[in-house]
Image (cartoon, rainbow, N blue to C red):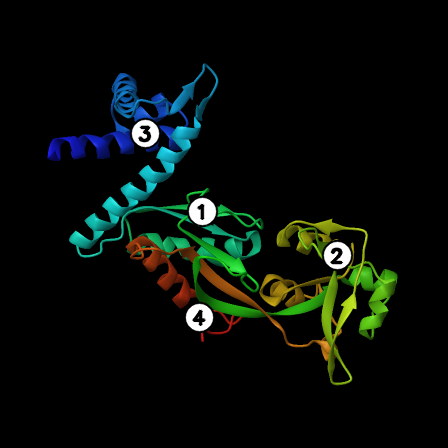
Amino acid sequence: MARILMERSGEMEVFARVVQEGGFSAAARSLDITPSAVSKLIARLEARLGTRLLVRTTRALTLTEEGEAYHHAALRILQELNDADQEATGGAVRGRLRVNATIPFGTMFVAPAMPDFIARNPDLIVDLSFTDGIVDLVAEKTDVAIRMGNLPDSSLIARKLGQSRRVVCAAPSYIKRRGRPEAPPDLENHDCLTFNFRRTRPSWPFRCEGREIAQPVKGSIVVNNGETMKQMTLAGAGIARVGLFHVADEIAAGRLIPLLEDHNPGDVELVHAVYVGGGPLPQRVRAFIEHMVVTLGESPLLKGTS
């Protein structure tokens, strides 16, 4: 029985590597074995299961429906085996850590924090993916994601990392061309840059005469990520409302001008690390989150984690 279980875990690892690398030859190189050995292991696995897991052509390799299900289960089992190894070795941080973050936050905070993190954990490989789209952590095989804003209800576990207040701003060139809004209703006559992943009619919160209002905004340009939003604002395309952390340097240098600060409601953009629950937190994920807590706690642009 022990020999059979050992063979199964080896087959799972090879199968998962073939899917990850996208082919037998690439998987063989990463595992330091021959392509024929990889082919034999996959053939033995399919024969034992009595079903085809992979469809192989001269141009591509794709998973069958059964292959998708087995791949998902294999990744979970291999992760549990890796976690067991970590527990047995005193929680050593090793393996591959897959991290997803928004483009602005990733480039400003995550990437600069990685050299020190890797120096502390030399047996770890960090796989970074920056996008403003919301990724499915399970489908994308992501260990931890950093999300901005309020979190919807989900089965994910969240750890607050910090927060940043929002600011309305525009470039001097835009203000010279279109004028400066003095009150929130003035925005009706301005080009306001908005995100195309907002499904409701765009509106921005303000405080007027002691009460909160939602000011409708509109404009000629909508974008799908914060970095593009900043670049369009710097180019004078319109007025934006963004996290202060993203534009603090531009404001300090005078390249962007804060607007309507007397009406700023003081709302904040929360920053969370989220990960899939259901078992002990892998040491590599725990180490990353704790490193980011310390790193972000030292940033004057982000408030503490209370």
Between label 2 and label 4, give the one nearer the viewer. 2
Q: Which residue is mark 3?
A: 15
| Nearer the camera: disc 2 or disc 3 | 3
Circle 3 SS class: helix
* Closer-to-camera residue (208/276): 276
User: What residue is pinned by disc 4?
Assistant: 297
- State how far apart marks 3 and 4 are (Cα): 41 Å
Q: Write down the residue under mark 1.
A: 128
In the image, taking residue 188 as reference, residue 137 lies left or right, namely left
Q: Amino acid at mark 4?
A: Gly
User: Amino acid under label 2?
Assistant: Leu
CA–CA distance in space, label 1 to label 2 = 28 Å
Tell which circle, 2 or 4, labels the residue nearer the N-terminal end. 2
Instruction: Kindly indicate the quadrant of the structure image that contains residue 54.
Output: top left
- Please state the horizontal and vertical placement of residue 128, each as a whole percent of the image: 45, 47
| Numbered badge on residue 193 | 2
Q: Nearer the viewer, residue 209 or 240?
A: 209
Asked if the residues shown at circle 4 and circle 1 are in contact, with their CB atoms under 8 angstroms apart, the answer is no
Which element is circle 4 on? helix
Quote the CA–CA distance across marks 3 and 1: 23 Å
List the single residue furthest toward the front. Answer: 50
Q: In the current view of this chain or complex, which residue is farthest to the bottom? A: 210
For marks 3 and 1, the one nearer the N-term is 3
Say few, some or many: other residues with alpha carbon within 10 Å of mark 3 (under 14 / 14 to 19 / 20 or more): many
Q: Percent from the top left, x then y, of residue 40?
A: 26, 18
